[in-house]
């Protein structure tokens, strides 16, 4: 059994994901390694998150790579953006493979392909990969031409890459007290060290690698961050930071122990980049809050909407020469650094803003327009049936990604997930009551279609 994805039967919005050893098997990982090794001749860097199944799947991926004559560079446990930055900087490396399920629950794992510029594979590349996977037309190597496995260190390269792009002196002068919750994921390997090198006083929680994720679910949403909020208040910290399983996302808690909405952080950073560049384009998915569009336009910038998924956001950023981009889930993309989400770069920029403006995070976000967004998810095993039903239910809607219905006082988005057997429902309006009405309308439509 394989997970139904947005691209085809195998590849979803962000690579291949499924329950480890049930849906995502060793045999699949082996053949996915062969796919990458056949498509990208040369050296391929491989890294993994901390999940219990990651060493097993990483070994299979490396076996697949070397069986078709590609050399593998094993980076061990690494944040996905650290792998991507390594691939971008090392000219002899022709691509990368991340073994990670990012924010998905602990039983999941995934495999994601990386281009030689550090970006994730585009949808066209995923389709090509899927065709090769199905045909099994691999270029197997002779016994004396099989690939070799090398080991390398990525941390210094990655940390220096971030440190070179932010105002370290300004941050260090403020001696911020920061609580970092790595969620027992790959961010444990780099984020506490980066904060120390930024001159912060660091309090770490859940910052030892543990693939059981004993303290919380890997997704850094508000309901999973009670310990972080309590710790920030208890130690009187300036900022709380939380990562997902592979640290390509970061979410934040202010100095009062309050969770800061991911869309508000996206809007804050979009405004910062447009003002810094004297204009420019900001790319974000149709699921992002209207507050992002409001602040971008007010600052003299232009908003460009895409389907959901960081690969398509990054691809569009490259096409339109965007100054900034990101998603309303804690995944921010800084083009001067990497055309991919990076949680460590995100918190470094937030600290820089706090230092340069001389304001706490609660003050920085005060002027972001207030909207009420409500999100929920409903189990969905038959995504094709759902989409067909939505087209009949809302024939005049926007079908860029799922279905988005815009109203004068808000909007509703119903979108099947590309990585899990669920449908996500988003509703936003100026009042919480209206947002709830829109959400209820969406849930009613989904239940009517699915039965």
Image (tube, rainbow, N blue to C red):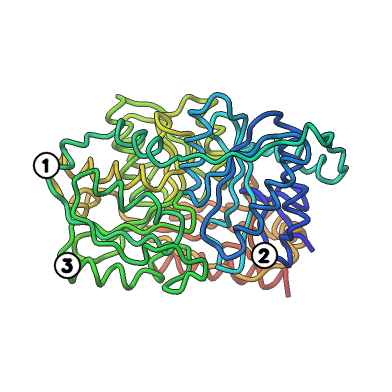
Between the C-alphas of marks 2 and 1, the distance is 45 Å
Residue in view at x 73 percent, y 75 percent: 451
At mark 3, the secondary structure is helix
Q: Quadrant of residue 358?
A: top left
Height in image: 160 above or below 388?
Answer: above
Between the C-alphas of marks 3 and 2, the distance is 38 Å
At mark 2, the secondary structure is loop
Q: Earlier in the sequence, mark 2 or mark 1?
A: 2
Residue 212 percent coordinates (x, y): 51, 71
Q: How many marks?
A: 3
Question: Which of these two is toward me, 161 or 340?
Answer: 161
Q: Is residue 417 visible?
A: no
- The residue that disc 3 covers is 235
Residue in view at x 36 percent, y 69 percent: 225
- The residue that disc 2 covers is 20
Q: Earlier in the sequence, mark 1 or mark 3?
A: 1
- The residue that disc 1 covers is 173
- The image quadrant where one finds the N terminus is bottom right
Question: Which of these two is toward me, 333 or 34?
Answer: 34
């Amino acid at each position: 059994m394989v997970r139904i994805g947005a691209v085809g039967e195998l590849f979803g919005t962000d690579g291949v994901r499924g329950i480890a050893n049930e849906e995502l098997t060793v045999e699949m990982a082996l053949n996915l390694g062969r796919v990458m090794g056949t498509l990208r001749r040369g050296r391929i860097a491989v890294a993994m998150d901390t999940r219990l199944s990651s060493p097993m799947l990483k070994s299979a991926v490396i076996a697949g790579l070397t069986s078709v004559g590609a050399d593998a560079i094993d980076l061990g446990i690494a944040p996905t953006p650290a792998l991507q930055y390594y691939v971008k900087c090392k000219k002899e490396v022709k691509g990368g493979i991340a073994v990670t399920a990012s924010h998905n629950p602990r039983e999941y794992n995934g495999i994601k392909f990386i281009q030689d510029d550090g970006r994730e594979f585009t949808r066209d590349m995923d389709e090509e990969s899927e065709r090769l996977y199905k045909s099994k037309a691999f270029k197997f190597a002779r016994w004396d031409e099989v690939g070799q496995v090398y080991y390398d260190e990525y941390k210094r390269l990655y940390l220096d890459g971030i440190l070179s792009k932010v105002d370290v002196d300004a941050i260090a002068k403020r001696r911020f007290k920061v609580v970092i919750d790595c969620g027992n994921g790959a961010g444990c390997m780099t984020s506490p060290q980066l904060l120390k090198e930024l001159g912060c006083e660091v309090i770490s929680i859940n910052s030892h690698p543990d693939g059981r994720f004993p303290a919380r679910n890997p997704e850094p949403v508000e309901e999973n961050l009670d310990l972080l909020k309590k710790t920030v208040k208890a130690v009187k910290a300036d900022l709380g930071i939380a990562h997902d399983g592979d640290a390509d996302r970061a979410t934040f808690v202010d100095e009062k122990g309050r969770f800061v909405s991911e869309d508000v952080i996206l809007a804050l950073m979009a405004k910062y980049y447009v003002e810094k560049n004297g204009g420019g384009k900001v790319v974000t998915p149709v699921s992002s809050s209207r507050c992002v569009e409001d602040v971008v336009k007010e600052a003299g910038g232009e908003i460009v909407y895409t389907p959901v998924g960081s690969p398509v956001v990054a691809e569009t950023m490259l096409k339109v020469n965007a100054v900034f981009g990101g998603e309303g889930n804690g995944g921010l993309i800084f083009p001067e650094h990497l055309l991919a989400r990076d949680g460590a770069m995100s918190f470094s920029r937030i600290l820089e803003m706090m230092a340069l403006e001389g304001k706490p995070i609660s003050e920085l976000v005060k002027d972001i327009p207030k909207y009420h967004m409500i999100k929920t998810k409903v189990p969905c095993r038959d995504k094709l049936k759902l989409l067909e039903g939505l087209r009949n239910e809302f024939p005049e809607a926007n079908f860029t990604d799922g279905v988005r219905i815009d109203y004068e006082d808000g909007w509703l988005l119903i979108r099947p997930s590309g990585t899990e057997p669920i449908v996500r429902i988003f509703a936003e309006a100026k009042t919480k009551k209206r947002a709830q009405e829109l959400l209820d309308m969406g849930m009613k439509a989904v239940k009517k279609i699915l039965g």
